[in-house]
Image: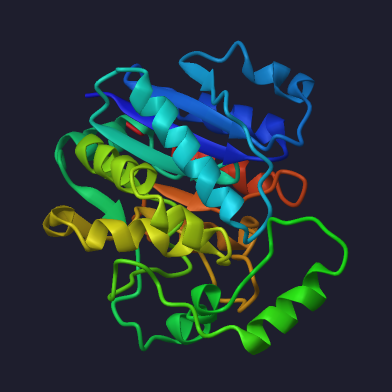
Amino acid sequence: MRVAHIIITHKNYSQVARLIQTMQHPQFDFYIHSDARVPAAELDNLKDLPNTFFIRKRIKCNWGGYSLLKAIFNSLSEVLATGIEYDFISLLSGQDYPISPPQQFHKFLMQQKGKNFISYDESQESEWWRKAAARYEKYHFTDFRFKGKFLLERIVNKIAPERKFPEYTTLYGGNTSTWWTISRDCAVYLNQKFNGNSQLPKFLKFCWGTDEFVIPTIIMNSHFKEHTINNNLRYIDWSEGKDSPKLFDLSDYDNIKNSKKLLARKFDINYDRHILNKIDQQLLTNHH
């Protein structure tokens, strides 16, 4: 049973190398999408890692921009185009790290064939959704670069009618929805739906933070809904109430350990590498 792990990254390439080395398994392949702003030379230390490949169609990803979603779909297309019959495709960031041994991860997925693991808020009345509606109802020029863009954005949003999301009336998403592990069939469906429908990408170009609600919306409005579990297998801590999740340090070890998840994010070796060392020693060593 083969698994493709797509890693979306833009910095800390020694940390990305560590992530891949730690997750090594004969049935795991890794596909790296590195932000197009990063010089190719920075990726040199990843070239010799086993089962590691590079997404050729790299793009510049802007925080909150539609560009991140586009990078995800570019990566998905390339993985599917390899013709390798992966059973699962998993989306990671370069700041993820396994918190259970790769053998355990593989064994878990073997027992869950055909399932999709993705997290979303159950209710559109949730606090996240109350703020999130503006992401698609208003125009956002996040990926555009021109003088006076914020002024134009304000003017357009004053005079333009509220935007209506195409095709779907019930939307799914949340602040942990970006990262997931899905079956191959679901990935094929996602890719066809996204690339075969010119209306959706056109609309999404002017949305904000699409990575947190577009993919769960497509999946949960399809027959794959019955095979989808609302759990993305990742421990992410949003308790600080900031725009991005908590960066873990040594004090988070017990919470990480007790989370019973397979992966955690967010880590940064320049902020605290000791937490990764402790995870290696305590959680990733097979204690017999």
Give how far across and how far down residue 192 sits, in percent. 30, 41
Mark count: 0
Q: Residue at x 30, y 58 (%)?
A: 218
Give how far across and how far down residue 93 sits, in percent. 55, 44
Q: Is residue 17 left or right of residue 124?
A: right
Q: Is residue 245 left or right of residue 27?
A: right
Q: How is the image coloured?
A: rainbow
Task: Work out whether residue 43 can be spotted.
Answer: yes
Q: Quadrant of residue 121?
A: bottom left
Give how far across and how far down residue 5 sits, in percent. 42, 33
The residue nearer to you, when weighing 95 against 43, is 43
Q: Is residue 141 left or right of residue 280?
A: right
Q: Residue at x 28, y 35 (%)?
A: 88
Q: Does residue 147 sit above or below 114 in this rendering?
A: below
Q: Does residue 54 sit above or below 241 in this rendering?
A: above
The residue nearer to you, when weighing 234 against 223, is 223
Give how far across and how far down residue 145 sits, in percent. 79, 55
Quarter occupied by the N terminus: top left
Quarter occupied by the C terminus: top left
The residue nearer to you, when weighing 61 against 206, is 206
Q: Is residue 186 left or right of residue 45?
A: left
Task: Work out whether residue 254 can be spotted.
Answer: no
Q: Quadrant of residue 108?
A: top left
